[in-house]
Amino acid sequence: MAPKARKRSPSKGRGKGKGKGKGKGKASRPSTSLGYPEDIFPLVLTSATQELFNCRIDEDVTEKSPFKLLKKDDIIDDMKRRAAVSDFSPVKQTVLAYPEEEMLLVFDSNLTYGQFFYLVLTPESKDRILKSPEGEELLMADKRPQFWISLGSEKEIEEPIKETREKLRLKLRVDRAVQSKVCFSDRDCAESKDGHLECTSYEDSKFKIKKLLTDCGVQAVPMIQTNSCQTMRMVPKDTFTQYEPREFSTEEKETILKEQSLMNFCKAQIPRMLFALQQEEIINVFLDDWKALATGLEACDWSGQVSDTLVLHQVFTDQKFAKSKTISCLNWHPTIYGVIAVAMTKRHEELAEAVSSPPLIVFYSFSNPSSPQFLLECPDDILAFQFSPSNPNIIVGGCLNGQVLLWDISAHVTFIQATQPGSRRESINSDKFDLNDSRENIPIVRFCAVSALESSHKAPVTDVQWLPPTFEVTMMGLPVENKQKVSIQIITCSPDCTLRFWDVRLPAEFSNTPTESTPTVDHKTPMTTCSVPETFKHLDRTWKPMFRVSLSKIDTKGEYVPMKFSFENFITTTERDKEIKGTEALLDYSQLKIPASEKLKEMDNINTKFFVGTENGEIIYSDWKLESDDSGRPHSSKPFACFNSHHWLVNTVQRSPFFKDILLSTGGWNFAIWKEGVMDGPLVASQYFEQECTVGCWSLSRPAVFFIGKTDGSVEIWDLLKNSSEPLQLHPHISKSKITCMKACSFTAKQHFLAVADDLGVLRIFEIPKALYLPSRHESLSMKKYFDLEAESLKDYLKREEFWTKHKKEEEEHKTKLKKEPEKPETPPKEIHRLDLTEYSDDLILEEELLQDMGLWPIAVESER
């Protein structure tokens, strides 16, 4: 029966291991800058490694018995066999230099040093831990004798008799004459009367022996029999057989070739052979048609016949750079397969402590999951970054101190491409594991430019996005024609209540001198760690925003606090455009200049309205165009609408990749789906969950599917076509901490991935199954009808609500009016009787008048008599 996994709270492990550092068998030792003592090393052991070394949690090692001795040779064999995938690879040098044959592994149930296990690296620490009272008690527990359990065998075996009294010793001496001759002969004792004396047993009345009860154990063992057999050895002999084909003689060959039947056969079969060869060149005859059936996006829905769960593909973590860090943002590389970048930032509880490692953006690759490819240096923690849509080598990021940064990784792209499958560097034998390799030579790329501190945001930059290459904006926010067809402007938002627009081009009056010209990058020679690209040298520490947009409150004074934003960035590209984009060379940003504004054509078809998610859970709909007051000074217009849909800060505002007017927002304990143009509220608003929704993202291949991450480390998959009130799938306990980021990516039509990052700095890559990336027939059209119906239902609901509110108000006014009127006094019973008689007499008079008018009065009187 499989052991049950113990559920642990993420906050519990961190809270206990942060300040106290108490655990069984651990003495207080000075900590290094890494956050743990020098003589131990925290390890992450997968379930396969735990089963291989018999150190499974709650089975082999428990909270009461946390120690496990591992053989040094077994650890080295595991590192040689699994190479960099081995969980002991971070301490391979220490393991090789360890002097003893066994190493101590300790199960840390309280997560004192951030992981469930840590390995003791020195024999002195091992002896100190094992000689502690807890260690000696646990080690002596295995040596204590086990009690014998009776199964009834003692009743079948006769109990032996044991002697308990001491034997009496008698010493007899017979006097014999000295040198007397003695003659011995044989005689039968029965012949003489005194030949023998019989001592019969009798019961002694004065002496009694009490029987004592004793516990005896009997071990039944089988009888051992030793046999042997001698086999005659046969001498091996090498044998072989030679086959030779039988050949026709020359005369027979000439006779067969001249036969008419052979010539007729060749004339008939040669056209068929040529046709078969032609078909083989045109069509792949070895293709399995059944496997290739319904693999296109236009095929029918096969989701019910294949697996529909997420499959873990890769796990990326690093003990050096991810220690006490969380992943605040992640992005897939737009063009290179299997490369993903994550921003490492300090956790909230670690902000006041000393910095263990500098803030970095780490690049991971599928080809080498054991270590990062290279790092981006940052002056402060990065909360948001994005690749340029026109040149993936250009990256923009927003810092915790409000500054905006630019990187150029052109010199390191060749290094990443060389590590991809199929490249020439893959020709090296990857089965050999070098125990002396080092990870200290990871290249670090320094930022090219940073904005001026006095012109930057006054709060952390929480979101950053590039404007599409189809247009650019002026100083007043008007969209104009972008003749260069390159993304050259950036939008950032911050809790300082502003959105700012930035331009990365050279000013029109700026020109490089010959000594300051931008150097050409040699892609054959990688850059050193200290070298800095001069792509944006003209912006370094002087970069200022073009203009800023403030979000004033609609009804009251004050401003909204933006956290995330989304504008319309829906660009349709044809296959021809993709081919041209893949073959053209990347544009050099250092050669771009800002043109004169009067030469640019204004574009009226560009939508300048955008959605903003705030710190208090509101969804704001506003316009970035600036207006002029009576004095001619530009100012931001007030938002058009404000919706209180979330009860906590909004962490996701993302547009659907299939519909440019559909948005997904998450925040607090629910999510909502909006449609631009419907100003009455969200089309779909979920119920309030027990766990907080931390992130959400759309599927890139199915319009009805999106993913929601929560604080308990679970991921929900929703399909609006199947159920809009419950998730289609729930994947609990993907991580033991909250989900911080999620991004979907599709490299090919059959290969889709979902990147999930958590608060512990661990990045997990899941492969999306066919049921979740293959759309059903006419799914896009069905979703469009679904959103239209939801919009109509919302309008109908609002009309009914308005009618109900009006009706309720009228009822309340009527009740209030009745309360104000004076109450009538009660009529006494005698008065009521008098009024009834008066009414009755009036009815009789009226009856008499009616009968007289009809001429029936005398007849009616006579009939009554």
Image (cartoon, rainbow, N blue to C red):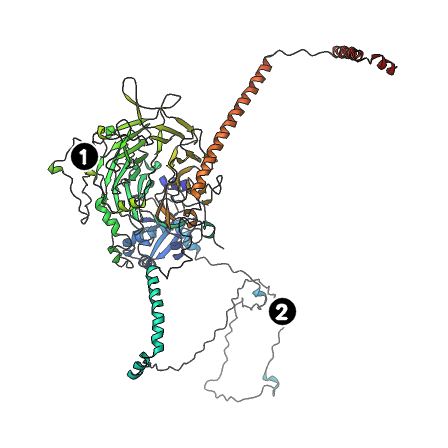
Helix, strand or loop for disc 2: loop
Which residue is the site of mark 1?
Answer: 538
- The tally of labels here is 2
Quadrant occupied by the C terminus: top right
Pick the residue in front: 65 or 710: 710
For residue 28, the mark is none
Which residue is the site of mark 2?
Answer: 204
Near mark 1 (Cα within 10 A), the count class, few <14, some 14-19 or many ≥20, is: many
When the figure is inspected, residue 592 is found, relative to residue 249, above or below; the finding is above
The answer to whether residue 825 of the structure is visible from this angle is yes
Where does the image place residue 527, in percent across and percent down from the top left? Answer: 19, 46
Q: Is residue 139 left or right of residue 94?
A: right
Near mark 2 (Cα within 10 A), the count class, few <14, some 14-19 or many ≥20, is: few
Where does the image place residue 223, in percent across and percent down from the top left? Answer: 50, 73
Q: Is residue 357 left or right of residue 11?
A: left
Kind of residue at badge 2? Asp
Where does the image place residue 113, in percent across and percent down from the top left? Answer: 35, 45
Name of the residue lying farthest toward the right: 865
The answer to whether residue 33 of the structure is visible from this angle is no
When the figure is inspected, residue 83 is found, relative to residue 389, above or below; the finding is below
Kind of residue at badge 1? His
Helix, strand or loop for disc 1: helix
